[in-house]
Amino acid sequence: MVPNQKVILPLLEEKEVNLYIKREDMLHPHVSGNKYRKLKYNLIEAEKLGCSNLLTFGGAFSNHIAATAFAGNKAGFKTIGVIRGEELQNSWKQNPTLKLAHEMGMKFHFISRSTFRLKESDSFLKELRDTFGDFYLLPEGGTNPPAIKGCEEILVEADSNFDHICCSVGAGGTIAGIINSSKPEQSILGFPSLKGNFLKQDIRKFARKDNWDLITDYHFGGYAKVDAELVDFINDFKSKTNIPLDPIYTGKMLFGILDLVKKGFFKPNTRILAIHTGGLQGIKGMNLVLKKKELPILDL
């Protein structure tokens, strides 16, 4: 069981709000947070079906790609990563995420961004099976019914005394699992890292309760968009709490939570549990991007 770490900050004391972080990032050094949860039952299902190959999709710094490569290797599977961006074919060795995945035995198949958008089409999946043979398919980000089952194990009985459960949102699978295992009287708040209103529809495919909402004001411009304000916040938060945050998901969520605390969104004596979904492996890659843009970098 991972710990719930209390966050001690003057703002929280002033507003009389209790904030804890569930340190899912401490589950495993390479397959941490929600990626561990999403892969757990998928690997069991793949083994049950007799599949020896796992195939999945992701971008240049995908946590899911890194986690699938590592977990697949340790469980005895061969792994194939269909990577968005043909230009990476000649530069992936300088990419920390892809380098780690390759070291874990993952084969790469680089495709254009336009082709990547076809990743769920039957014709494209047939092409992939013709090229690589049979495989167990993991969707981009890993969200499917076995993944939801794994994410339903994030909350435990000891978490039932929290008023709000906060979670960053990508594809929506993690928050759906949390919603399903939450208590009816709890409020589940999702902080999307993407622009757009389509996420509610995606979450409803798997969520079985209505005690949730999305806070859509803290995506910082969209998926993988990071600016100096967010970098400074993450570095300051780590220096004050000793808790590292990733810039794609958990960093944006914590920025949002503390901004809402500042604005009086949470009543005094409210108990908040924020889920740390891992993703720390992506910091090295993000720092390469930030350096190119001449922006401050994240502390490692």
Image: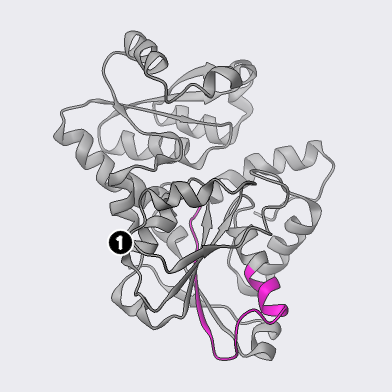
Give coordinates of residue 65: x percent, y percent. 46, 35
What is the span of residues highlighted in magenta in the rendered image?
Answer: 257-278
The residue type indicated by label 1 comes to: Glu
Using the rendered view, name the quadrant where residue 268 is placed. Answer: bottom right
Query: Crowding near pointer 1: few (<14 within 10 Å), some, many (20+)?
Result: few
Up/down of 186 relative to 101, above or below? below
- Left or right: 212 as drawn, with respect to 251: left
Q: Identify the image quadrant of the C terminus.
A: bottom right
Using the rendered view, name the quadrant where residue 136 is placed. Answer: top left
Q: Residue furthest right?
A: 294
Give coordinates of residue 18: x percent, y percent. 55, 84
Residue lying at 50% horizontally and 42% vertically, measured from the top left? 63
Residue lying at 68% horizontally and 59% vertically, measured from the top left? 217
Give coordinates of residue 234: x percent, y percent. 69, 61
Up/down of 131 relative to 256, above or below? above
Considering the numbered disc 1 on the image, is that residue within a helix, a strand or a loop?
Answer: loop
Residue 141 in view in this figure: yes
Q: Is residue 271 magenta?
A: yes
Residue 29 in view in this figure: no
Q: Residue furthest top?
A: 130
Q: Is residue 24 magenta?
A: no
* Residue at mark 1: 153
In this orientation, which residue lies closer to the viewer: 191 or 238?
A: 191
